[in-house]
Image (cartoon, rainbow, N blue to C red):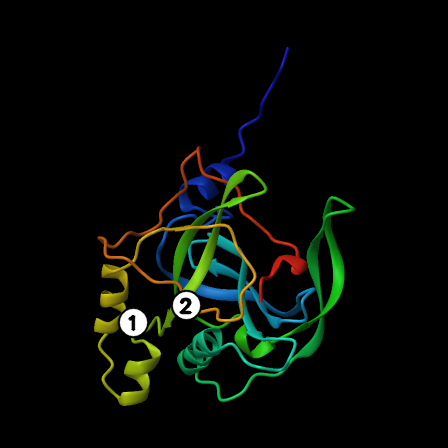
């Protein structure tokens, strides 16, 4: 005989979306629970984020690759980081050592790891726009979420509106009106990385993923193509 006991706490979490992965393009309000420095095998440096919504949904492996091994900055991602800093009221961010729990593939679980984090970017209210990207990886279709815009959750103003004093949320509306999922071709090495284009579509908003959702994709550092 098999017996299952009711867990009312988990039942409530399921309806609230606590711990559910974000898998739909749209605008979300929450905070970054992690913003750590990453260095790819190519020498490219950037920041990896974990974002958690106010409802408890989670998006992991969100990356902004900022500087090539040559020291040349990648303008598009620097623009996104600058927009995030405007929305958070920051002029500068610096790394500091911290111990966090990270997934260890060899041990098959999370282990305490000392890393360099950008503490000023973490645990502060922020709005983000995420774009779902589906791509082929090693013969399989996989999904990841991409950071494409930030906004002040108090009034939905983007960085441009904050800086020019025209806070209205209209710029965010335009972004959402043109937001749709992106199907990416296999990555190839290139030196002229640019921001991905957005096509026109009706705005969408995440609630909960379908049972047929594709798994998160987490690429090895050596796979960063720039």
- Numbered tag placed on residue 156 in the rendering: 1
**Label 2 environment density (alpha carbons within 10 Å; few <14, some 14–19, many ≥20):** few
Q: How many marks?
A: 2
Q: Is residue 141 left or right of residue 39?
A: left
Q: Is residue 2 left or right of residue 14?
A: right
Q: Position of residue 165 (x, y in %)?
A: 26, 88
Q: Is residue 2 above or below residue 96?
A: above
Marks 1/2: CA distance? 22 Å
Which mark is nearer the camera, 1 or 2?
2
Q: Going 31% across and 82% down the picture, which residue do you hit?
A: 160
Mark 1 lies on a secondary structure that is loop
Q: Is residue 99 above or below residue 5?
A: below
Q: Position of residue 64 (x, y in %)?
A: 52, 69
Q: Going 32% across and 73% down the picture, which residue do you hit?
A: 154
Image quadrant containing the C terminus: bottom right
Quarter-of-image position of residue 1:
top right
Q: Is residue 182 left or right of residue 139?
A: left
Front residue (pair 212, 7): 212
Q: Residue furthest top?
A: 1
Q: Going 61% across and 18% down the picture, which residue do you hit?
A: 3
Front residue (pair 139, 117): 139
N-term-proximal mark, 1 vs 2: 1
Q: Position of residue 155 (x, y in %)?
A: 28, 74
Q: Position of residue 183 (x, y in %)?
A: 40, 49
Quarter-of-image position of residue 99:
bottom right
Name the residue tied to disc 2: 195
């Amino acid at each position: 005989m098999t017996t299952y006991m009711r867990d009312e706490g988990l039942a409530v979490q399921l309806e609230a979306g606590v711990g559910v992965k974000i898998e739909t393009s749209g605008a979300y309000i929450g905070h970054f629970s992690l913003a750590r420095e990453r260095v790819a095998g190519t020498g490219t440096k950037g920041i990896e984020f974990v974002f958690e919504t106010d409802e408890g949904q989670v998006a992991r492996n969100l990356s902004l690759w900022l500087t090539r091994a040559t020291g040349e900055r990648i303008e598009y991602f620097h623009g996104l980081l600058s927009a995030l800093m405007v929305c958070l009221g920051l002029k500068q961010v610096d790394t500091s050592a911290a111990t966090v729990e990270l997934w260890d593939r060899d041990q098959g679980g999370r282990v305490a790891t000392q890393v360099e984090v950008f503490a000023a970017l973490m645990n502060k209210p922020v709005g983000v726009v995420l774009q779902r990207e589906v791509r082929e990886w090693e013969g399989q279709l996989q999904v990841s979420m991409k950071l494409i815009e930030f906004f002040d959750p108090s009034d939905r103003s983007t960085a441009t509106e904050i800086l020019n004093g025209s806070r209205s949320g209209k710029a965010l509306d335009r972004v959402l009106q043109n937001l749709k999922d992106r199907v990416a071709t296999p990555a190839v090495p290139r030196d002229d990385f640019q921001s991905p284009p957005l096509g026109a579509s009706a705005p969408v908003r995440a609630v909960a993923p379908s049972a047929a959702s594709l798994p998160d994709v987490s690429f090895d550092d050596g796979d960063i193509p720039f």
